[in-house]
Amino acid sequence: MGDWLFQGDYATAPTNVPAVALGLMLAFLCGHVIAWVYTHTHNGLSYSRSFVASLATIPIIVSLVMMVLANNLVTAFGMMAVFAVVRFRNVLRDTLDTTYVLCVIVVGMACGTQKYATAVVGCTLIMAVILYMHYTQFGARHRYDLIVNLHWGRESREMPELLDVFHRHTQMAQCASQRSSEGVPGADLSYRLLMRDPVRVNDLLGELKGLPGVSRLTSMQAQDENEM
């Protein structure tokens, strides 16, 4: 049984079973690291557990495909015909998800062609870049945490009382829009807020609800607006 397992591939070149096992295990480990980084850094509404599982599995499959296609032109054309019949269609809402898919495919190709050092160094560097962009918020345009919409039903000269509430809880309060209607007292206001302590959002909302003249209060996190 053992001889058949290790000598059962009747290919033009003998199969290096330890190298195959090492390549598949390394592909799994790199895919697992990429999936963990994706889970840790993902923001928004498009998170999918099946997509995370795919990130950990695709490198193994690609690595095995590269091993099968190694130095075998006939098999390569056969695999092209198979992939032409089987089509994978999946709409990725986040552009960064495409980057993860390309990353796991390249890592799987490197492991499948026994370029183990390239796979490890490449996976480490790419994940370090993604973590850097996540923690530094690279590319972010909006420097605020919360969006608050409310109706102010009192006179405009009494607006400083509302601004005092914002001042106690925020580093910056920017009025994004102000709408008023004829015959209707007050105005509809929308503020972008940079919180002093993002954990105390509920304290701010509770104080606004208790402030006379405030009604129709709604709030939304800044990252949720970016997903719309």
Image: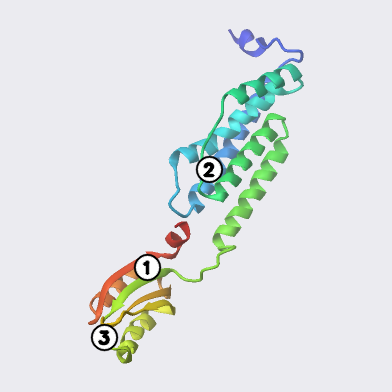
- Name the residue carrying label 3: 154
Q: Position of residue 70 (x, y in %)?
A: 73, 23
Q: Position of residue 156 (x, y in %)?
A: 32, 88
Callout 3: helix, strand or loop? loop
Asked if residue 177 can be seen in this view, the reply is: yes
What type is the residue that disc 1 sits on?
A: Val
- Name the residue carrying label 2: 35
| Residue at screen point 64% across, 44% down | 123
Q: Is residue 209 left or right of residue 138?
A: left
| Residue at screen point 67% across, 41% down | 120
Q: Is residue 139 left or right of residue 14?
A: left
From mark 1 to mark 2, how far is it between C-alphas? 28 Å
Image quarter for residue 73? top right
Mark 3, other Cα within 10 Å: few <14 / some 14–19 / many ≥20: some
From mark 3 to mark 2, how far is it between C-alphas? 52 Å
Mark 1, other Cα within 10 Å: few <14 / some 14–19 / many ≥20: few
